[in-house]
Image (cartoon, grey):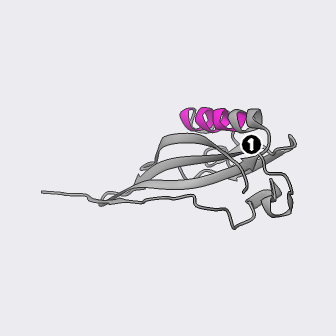
Amino acid sequence: MDKKIHKSTINNIAGLIEVSKNNQFDLLTNKDNGPYYLLFVEFETGDSFVYHEGIIEYVGLYTNKQRAQDNAYRIKEHHNSNGAKFGSKEYPEISVVLLSDDGKEFSMETPWNGYFESIKNIEILKMTVL
């Protein structure tokens, strides 16, 4: 009898210490308390033998709530269309085109796209700096 090993990950956002990728936003040099909007994707992955859930990929930190919502929509549409919508020109199936806080396009790899991967949640958390 085949059994998959089940693994789960617990994530906690207690503070931000790393500058975001792609120069989207540098929280450490901003003097404003916010609000900010943290966009992230929770997904699961695995293979024929292991199932792993609760993996989180942080997409970006935005001052513009609408921009975060637009990018959440792009991620969902990209995933549901297997890269046909909002996919990058070079690697449409595994890279989505998003917008930075100031409206500039950039592409991001999508580790939640694959044979064993599936998105469980796309979420935007409202945050302030204390």
Image quadrant where one finds the N terminus: bottom left
Can you name the residue that lies furthest to the left here? 1
Q: Residue 76: give x, y in percent of width and height.
A: 59, 35
Q: Is residue 84 visible?
A: no
Can you identify the residue that label 1 sits on? 98
Amino acid type, residue under disc 1 in the picture: Leu
Residue sitting nearer the eye, 69 or 92: 69
Residue sitting nearer the eye, 22 or 101: 101
Which span is picked out in magenta?
Answer: 70-80
Can you name the residue that lies furthest to the bottom here? 17
Q: Residue at x 62, y 36 (%)?
A: 78
Q: Residue 107: give x, y in percent of width and height.
A: 74, 49
Apparent side of residue 36 relative to residue 14 in the rendered image (left or right): right
Apparent side of residue 2 relative to residue 116 in the rendered image (left or right): left
Instruction: Establish if 42 lies above or below 82.
Output: below
Instruction: Establish if 19 lies above or below 39.
Output: below
Q: Residue 89: give x, y in percent of width and height.
A: 75, 44
Quadrant in the rendering for residue 130: bottom right
Q: Residue at x 60, y 50 (%)?
A: 110
Q: Residues within 10 Å of mark 1 (few under 14, many from 20)?
A: many
